[in-house]
Image (tube, rainbow, N blue to C red):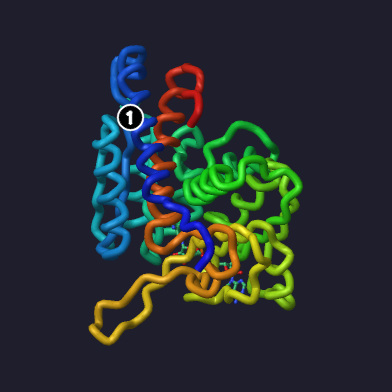
Amino acid sequence: MTARRIDGKAAALAIRERVAAFVPAFVGKAGRAPGLATVLVGEDAASAVYVRSKNRATAETGMVSFAHNLPDTTSEDQLLQLVTDLNADAQVDGILVQLPLPPQVNATRVIETIDPAKDVDGFHPINAGRLASGLPALVPCTPLGCLHLLKQELGDLTGLEAVVIGRSNIVGKPMAQLLLAENATVTVAHSRTRDLPAVVRRADIIIAAVGRPEMVRGDWIKPGAVVVDVGINRIPTDDGKGRLVGDVAYDEAADVAAAITPVPGGVGPMTIAMLMRNTLVAAHRRAGLADPEGL
Ligand code: NAD
């Protein structure tokens, strides 16, 4: 295996420490710490783990977390009312509604109800539109984390061929916008793309955000490419516990690529670090302060 293993854990820790370092100065100016409200509806085990990690990370950076755990019988009106209350709460700078939501709730309507200034997930159409227009926005955490790792690895991305596999609003589309803003030449591939391996073989940068275990094979990768694997897939094992793998066949890819993110320990930790960053940025903007520099 020749590829460098990109350490997302270490990069995420560094970001969280930088965020924490900004908090005392913010408290000095605003008279309060930045606040993140998390909203979890129902009992989904993976979602509960994610939300707990987000609340813990918020406290560790010196910010305040407001955890709202609602039963899975919560109606859409009840959830919209909570979001409206959080929009009006001066202590709350960021609102994170954990997806997926139960079937009786229209997730789009919930996202559209969040104040765009508090939309630390960056999913509101105003923030998506601002990102696409090259205006200051709150940017979805996972693609922001991927971009951070890429720039750390490659420096300037100008002119590089980037292939993003997946076109979701959460990962693929904002990833493509971020890469475009960095002057990469961007292709967005998806389930209807013809001859995906041939498309991926052009890439200097591969972002896999599909949700299919080890779909991207070693022989799809141009020697020297940098691979960022967003996928989180649990595959069965003999002991019944299952094992997490990405969307890329790691061992094969690591024989060809220059650098690659592992799963776990790659993109995953970056998502939470960027949520901390977005909360800090939202707090500064809401308080009329300049964005914290270098984040
Ligand atoms: P999604 O299901 O919304 O989108 C998947 C995309 O993959 C779609 O655009 C689809 O067109 C494309 N696709 C499906 N089958 C394909 C195929 N055979 N060939 C090419 N493209 C195909 O998923 P998502 O929310 O974007 O998440 C993608 C993966 O990333 C999942 O495994 C998810 O768990 C993971 N994820 C990880 C993090 C993190 O923090 N690391 C965050 C979000 C999502």
Asked whether the viewer can see residue 112, the reply is no
Q: Residue furthest bottom?
A: 238
Q: Residues within 10 Å of mark 1 (few under 14, many from 20)?
A: many
Q: Residue furthest front?
A: 2
Determine the residue positioned at 68% across, 68% down. Answer: 200
Residue 199 position within the rendered picture, expressed as x and y whole percent measured from the top left: 73, 69
Q: Is mark 1 within 8 Å of ligand 1?
A: no
Please indicate whether residue 55 sits to the left or right of residue 132 in the image: left
Q: For mark 1, what is the residue?
A: 20
Determine the residue positioned at 42% across, 51% down. Answer: 8
Determine the residue positioned at 40% across, 66% down. Answer: 103
Badge 1 marks a residue whose secondary structure is helix
Q: Quadrant of residue 38?
A: top left
Determine the residue positioned at 65% across, 73% down. Answer: 220
Please indicate whether residue 257 sits to the left or right of residue 31 in the image: right
> In front: 129, or 76?
129
Please indicate whether residue 287 sits to the left or right of residue 254 in the image: left
Amino acid carrying label 1: it is Ala
- In the rendered view, tell whether residue 251 sits above or below residue 55: below
Residue 59 position within the rendered picture, expressed as x and y whole percent measured from the top left: 24, 36
> In front: 46, or 219?
219
Asked whether the viewer can see residue 205, the reply is yes
Residue 201 position within the rendered picture, expressed as x and y whole percent measured from the top left: 70, 69
Please indicate whether residue 201 sits to the left or right of residue 84 in the image: right
> In front: 11, or 65?
11
> In front: 253, or 99?
253
Badge count: 1
Residue 174 position within the rendered picture, expressed as x and y whole percent measured from the top left: 60, 50
- In the rendered view, tell whether residue 167 sits above or below residue 25: below
